[in-house]
Amino acid sequence: QVQLVETGGGLVQAGGSLRLSCLVSGRTFSTRAMGWFCQAPGKDRDFVAAIDWFGGDTIYADSVKGRFTISRDFANNTVYLQMNSLKAEDTAIYYCAANRLSSPLPRAVPQYEWWGQGTQVTVSS
């Protein structure tokens, strides 16, 4: 079993930045792909970004390319999502997810096996 805990959400003005963290514990050796998803009220959970835990390859949703950066820290078993130039439409609950497979990096919700509880990001315009 893999446990994921997200932190770092909050309220920020449009144009501002936040960094989300996802601490990975448990059977961490099972994880290969780490992803971030977001879900706004009344909407589906959408893909944001993913990273190959060992290789470091990354993919992004078109809506966040050039603004968000996903990275990982082996020493601290943590995955980060640096969010810059935030927009009101980025407001959502952000979830961290993990999967055993990373080739190709998964973008779909059903492809991920483990999920965190989510952290709220609110961007005021």
Image: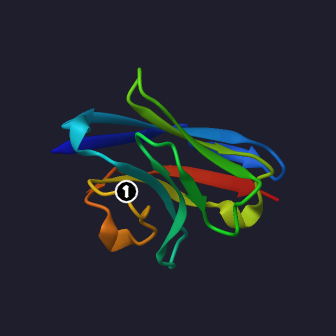
Image side of residue 84 versus residue 80, left or right:
right
**Amino acid type, mark 1:** Ser
Q: Is residue 52 above or below residue 62?
A: above
Rendered residue at 51%/78% (across/down):
43
In the rendered view, how is the structure colored? rainbow
Q: Position of residue 46 (x, y in %)?
A: 51, 71
Rendered residue at 25%/36% (across/down):
28
Q: Secondary structure at mark 1?
A: loop
Q: Which residue in the protein does label 1 denote?
A: 102
**Residue 76 is drawn in which quadrant?**
top left
| Viewport quadrant of the C terminus | bottom right
Q: Nearer the viewer, residue 110 or 38?
A: 110
Rendered residue at 72%/54% (across/down):
123
Image side of residue 94 versus residue 89, left or right:
left
Q: Position of residue 117 (x, y in %)?
A: 35, 50
- Extreme top residue here? 75
Rendered residue at 49%/50% (across/down):
51
